[in-house]
Amino acid sequence: MSIIYPVIHFSLALIEWVLISWAIRLWQQSTSLAMIVLPIVLVSISYDNIILSIGSLIGEGELLKTLSMLRFLLHYLVVPLFIVIGVELAHRAGASWANRVVRVLSWLIALGLTAIDVATHYLGLELVSIEFAGILRYHVANLSGPPIITIVVNLFVLLKLRVASLRVAERSRSSLCCPELCRWRSLSKSWVEVRQATLIIKVFALSGS
């Protein structure tokens, strides 16, 4: 039983590396600079899952603590960028509400939330080791409540990408589904599924700690 959760995190990391290769190709094909955010976010999430999966192998100490500090920093820096990804993918899927103003606004909101997260959570961060379900990790020592920004951002992205994937599906049924459209449909569906699985695992781990 203790090996199940490390294996799940490692499996998620592998899935995310597959998505990274897709995201890089989509960024190269895209005319939008915002699409570079997608592979960056996926690399960060993959790193998070890798550290969680091998924490018990590294063992308690300064090495794992340093790697965990970087994990938390990446978390605070990139999680708000999910908003940019959600809006950008919705725009690429043809959502009328994802216009230029909304796309610029998504950047401002994401950067604002990043600044708030770093200022209120990362600066002065103290970590303590904890073991749960076979996972040895460093946990915030003075955690005062659930990660509200993380939960809200994840729910926002899941909702928007579900809407975007449904729109792409409608367009594919009404056309011959050109290769670019099929790629967006596949990416949206895979991204939603991975984010759902990651969110469930993180919330479950949080409740158990």
Image (cartoon, rainbow, N blue to C red):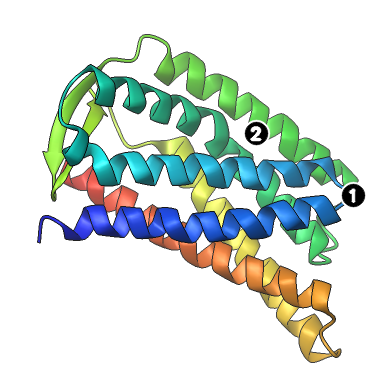
Left or right for 206, reference 125: left
The one nearer the camera, 21 or 80, is: 21
Residue underneath mark 1: 31
Q: Residue at x 36, y 9 (%)?
A: 124
Q: Which residue in the protein does label 2 denote?
A: 110
Mark 2 nearby-residue class (10 Å; few <14, some 14–19, many ≥20) = many
> Front-most of 58 and 9?
58
Relative to the observer, which residue lies in front, 25 or 173?
25
Task: Report whether residue 136 is seen.
Answer: no
Query: Residue shown at 58%/37% (left/top)?
Result: 80
- Identify the secondary structure beneath mark 1: loop
Neighbor class of circle 1 (other Cα within 10 Å; few <14, some 14-19, many 20+) is few
In three-dimensional space, the C-alpha distance between marks 1 and 2, rounded to whole angstroms, equals 21 Å
Figure quadrant of the C terminus? top left
At a point 14% along the width and 33% down the height, the residue shown is 130
Question: Where residue 181 appears, x then y in whole percent?
Answer: 80, 74
Residue 37 is at least partly visible in this image: yes
